[in-house]
Amino acid sequence: MKLSYILVKQRDDTMDQRKKIIIGISIVSVFIFLVTVLVFVYALASKGEAVPSFLQLFLDYHIHFMVIMGLFGVFSGLMGYNLLNTTIENQKKIVKTNVEIIMKFLNPEEREVVELLLKKDNMTTQSEISKAPGMTRLKAHRIVKKLEDRGVVHVEKYGKINMIRIVEELRNIK
């Protein structure tokens, strides 16, 4: 897949997500407005005050509106869940694509270190990396330094122990 195609696809997905967010916000806004009107009408009626004629329909059919509002609330919840779920899935796809692109630019030894980190839940020690086949302490140090300079890993020092972690943006890509 070409990089330009991936970037255009990601932009189109972002546009679709914005449209879905606007629709979701509109649905929730209508729901909140209708609940507010229903409560307002019911509060006026319970105090014995006159309900404006254009809101009399809500008072006459308040049971029906309550059932409709309940169903509308469930529908709004399902729409919100669907929107969030698709957003999360799209973000995971984007991250996975980005990681695949990054992996193509790494040499085999760097790729091996990143794969080891992925197997070890995104973190391990530098000494653990140096124990990999064909790896020495010096080689592990140099590879980790290159990956840190490129922003692929983050090194945390605990005394003489270097804890190597994949940066936050690249986590959860399995």
Image: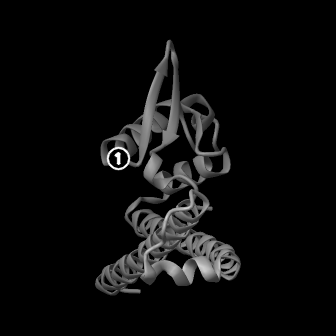
Is 81 on the left-hand or right-hand side of 101?
Answer: right
Question: In the image shown, does 40 or 28 lie closer to the viewer?
Answer: 40
Residue 9 lies in quadrant: bottom left
Is residue 115 positioned above or below 28 on the image?
above
**Residue drawn where x is 58% and y is 74% of the image:** 76
Using residue 10 as the reference point, say whether residue 168 is left or right of it: right
- Quadrant assignment for the N terminus: bottom left
Give whichever of 141, 9 is nearer the camera.
9
Within 10 Å of disc 1 (Cα), the crowding (few <14, some 14-19, many 20+) is few
Q: Nearer the viewer, residue 114 or 92?
A: 92
Q: Is residue 133 above or below residue 56?
A: above
Please state the horizontal and vertical placement of residue 67, each as a whole percent of the image.
71, 78
Residue 63 or 7: which is nearer the viewer?
A: 63
Residue 173 against residue 94 in the figure, above or below: above
Residue 31 image point, x, y percent: 52, 73
Tell me which corner region of the image, top left, top right, bottom left or bottom right, holds residue 72: bottom right
Which residue shows up at 67% across the image and 50% down it?
119
Q: Position of residue 69 (x, y in %)?
A: 63, 75
**Callout 1 amino acid:** Gly
Please tell me how many numbered marks the rendered image carries: 1
Residue topped by disc 1:
151
- Label 1: which secondary element: loop
Q: Residue at x 50, y 57 (%)?
A: 111
Residue found at x 34% / y 85%: 12
